[in-house]
Image (spheres, rainbow, N blue to C red):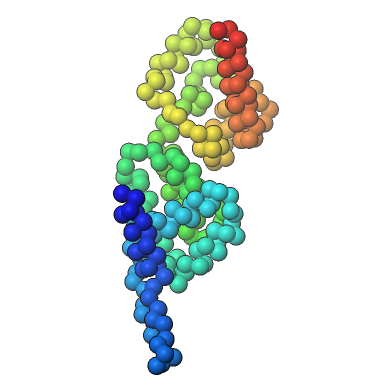
Amino acid sequence: MLKRLIQWIKRFFQRFLGGKARPTPESKAVQITSAPPLSDTDLEFLFTELLEGVHQARGQTWAQKWLNNLEHRVNTERWLSWLQGFGERLLATQNPHNELAARLVQLGELNIGPVGDLAYNIGMQLLTRHQGEPIWEYDGPDTVGQTAPEPAIAASTQSEEFPDAEYQTITLEQLLVLLQQDENLRQQIAQQLSLETDDPQLIIQTLVHQAQMEEQSSVTED
């Protein structure tokens, strides 16, 4: 498998670089043959490299330069056509693709033009399509201004509204993205945490701190 992967990469870069005939001693004329068009597989490989660079926080300048360096082989129109199909294939599957979605959103936030804008839209669709109603989005009878129900009833209601099968596991990075994009979600979580601000970073820090305190308390009780 590794040998086949190496061979594929070699063939890819041969196609990517294109063929240029070196001048022979008898003639200094240079014959240039046009490089074959990049396939969808080639574009996916290149786009994955772009997302990896963005994930490593190389920044807007690096991403824009990366696209510019490929302009002679892949123009903006070609990128958009391929990316549209790529996004449709992702959305057609049942897999969450949360990590990939977060990177697409991260690319879009760099403001590098149409390619980044489309990537952002696809990423947000992936992040929100299976969002459901996480427990911190519950907007039931226990909101501010209403009479708080009995503890036993509240626990029962919460159990009925949010069975274990609907719980989702997301990373802190993905939660941060959701908080940055959803003002209503920020306000509800901040309210439940008794915070005076809905700053996403502060919400994340508070959640982490409470989780650590609960873990320490559990260890102490054991």
Of residues 57 and 173, which is closer to you in this image?
A: 57
Of residues 114 and 93, which is closer to you in this image?
A: 93
| Residue at (42% x, 62% y) in the render | 79
- Relative to 87, residue 168 above or below: above
**Residue at the outermost bottom position:** 26
- Relative to 173, residue 10 above or below: below
Tell whether 148 sits left or right of 15: right
| Residue at (49% x, 47% y) in the render | 103
| Residue at (41% x, 82% y) in the render | 22
Residue 132, image x, y percentages: 41, 31
- The image quadrant of residue 92 is top left
**Residue at the outermost front position:** 25
Residue 134, image x, y percentages: 46, 27
- Regarding residue 83, the answer to whether it shows in the image is no
| Residue at (37% x, 62% y) in the render | 10
- Regarding residue 119, the answer to whether it shows in the image is yes
- The image quadrant of residue 73 is bottom left
**Residue at the outermost right position:** 196
- The image quadrant of residue 144 is top right
Residue 214, image x, y percentages: 58, 16
Tell whether 109 sits left or right of 202: left
- Relative to 83, residue 178 above or below: above
Of residues 147 and 217, which is closer to you in this image?
A: 217
